Amino acid sequence: MKLRHTQVLALVVAALAIIAATASYAKDKSNDSGRLLTGKVTGKQDQALVNAVVYLSNTRTRAVKSFIVGPDGVYRFPALSPNIDYEVYAQHEGHKSDTKTVSQFDTRPSVNINLRIDK
């Protein structure tokens, strides 16, 4: 009888541990909206370059996203995977900025990279 009581208790403890682990994992996944990359595209005199196109390349899949900046020159790429490196650069009227890298080893949830096009 004592052996059966011990087995039932062990099963209850194991079930509670599984439920707690599952709830913790679900909470972590719901809070993980990814990383945010923002920045501003500017010219030689630090003026915003309206209608510049910012390209974001996933270095693992080589998939490319683009963003056309507005009058303020600001771009925004939300919900990026924290486990992937990205390369970002801007183009405006045939000129290109330097390419910058967002590293998976940079653990900040929000990264700001300003891109400058000297033309």
Image (cartoon, rainbow, N blue to C red):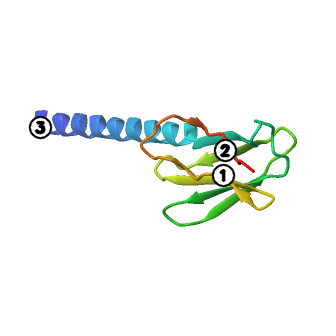
User: Residue 117 at what x, y percent from top left?
Assistant: 71, 48
Q: What residue is shown with label 2?
A: 115
Give the Cα separation between the discs numbered 2 and 3.
69 Å
Q: What residue is shown with label 1?
A: 97
- Crowding near the residue tagged with mark 2, few <14, some 14–19, many ≥20 C-alpha atoms within 10 Å: many
Is residue 72 something one can see in this rendering?
A: yes
Identify the residue shown where x is 81% and y is 59%: 93
Identify the residue shown where x is 55% and y is 40%: 32
**Mark 1 or 2, nearer chain start:** 1
- Crowding near the residue tagged with mark 1, few <14, some 14–19, many ≥20 C-alpha atoms within 10 Å: many
Please state which amino acid type lies under the numbered disc 2. Answer: Leu
- Crowding near the residue tagged with mark 3, few <14, some 14–19, many ≥20 C-alpha atoms within 10 Å: few
Is 41 situated left or right of 99 in this image? right
Is 103 situated left or right of 52 in this image? left
SS for callout 2: strand
Q: Is residue 44 above or below residue 88?
A: above
Circle number at residue 28: none
Is 4 situated left or right of 48 in this image? left
Please state which amino acid type lies under the numbered disc 3. Answer: Leu
Q: Residue at the right extreme?
A: 71
User: Residue 84 at what x, y percent from top left?
Assistant: 48, 53
Identify the residue shown where x is 28% and y is 34%: 13
